[in-house]
Amino acid sequence: MTKKDLRVIISSNLNVTEQCYEAQHKANKMLGLLKRTVKYRNPDILVRLYKSLVRPRLEYSSPLWSPHYKKDKLLLEKVQHCFTLLFDDLKALQYSERLTRLKLWSL
């Protein structure tokens, strides 16, 4: 059984996997919107849009539902991984190097 309060989903056994799926789904939708609407891929502009539109959906109330399973953390990190692949000149680099170049940190 799950309960939703203040947009946070918590199951009766305090498992937050469903919350992680919900956060990932909402963040992916916003990332898709950015991909479709922003044609000029200036890293400074896209990183600002990502930080203001996508990342808050991944971090909303995260101290409350902080994922502790590796699969949940990877699910959320996958959204940021897809974002870093938007830049053609960074695609050949490792994920950690792309984060460094874009001045982002791992979730």
Image (spheres, rainbow, N blue to C red):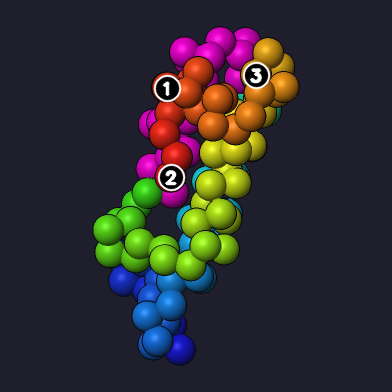
Q: Quadrant of the N terminus?
A: bottom left
**Residue to which mark 2 is pinned:** 107
Residue span colored magenta: 38-58
Q: Are marks 1 and 3 in contact (CB under 8 Å)?
A: no
Q: CA distance from mark 2 to mark 1?
A: 13 Å
Q: State the image coordinates of residue 28 (x, y, percent, origin top left).
A: 59, 45
Specify the amino acid type for callout 1.
Lys
> Does 105 appear above or below 60?
above
Q: State the image coordinates of residue 35 (x, y, percent, origin top left).
A: 65, 28
Residue depicted at 60% across the width and 38% down the height:
81
Residue depicted at 43% across the width and 77% down the height:
15
Query: Relative to the observer, which residue lies in front, 68 or 10?
Result: 68
Query: Relative to the observer, which residue lies in front, 2 or 103?
Result: 103
Query: Relative to the observer, which residue lies in front, 33 or 93?
Result: 93
Residue depicted at 42% across the width and 66% down the height:
68
Q: Quadrant of the C terminus?
A: top left
> Does 73 appear above or below 97?
below
Specify the amino acid type for callout 3.
Leu
Q: To which quarter of the image does residue 95 belong?
A: top right
Mark 1 or 3 closer to N-term?
A: 3
Residue 103 marker: 1
For mark 1, give the secondary structure: loop
For mark 2, give the secondary structure: loop
Q: State the image coordinates of residue 11 (x, y, percent, origin top left).
A: 42, 82
Q: Is residue 33 visible?
A: no
**Residue to which mark 3 is pinned:** 90
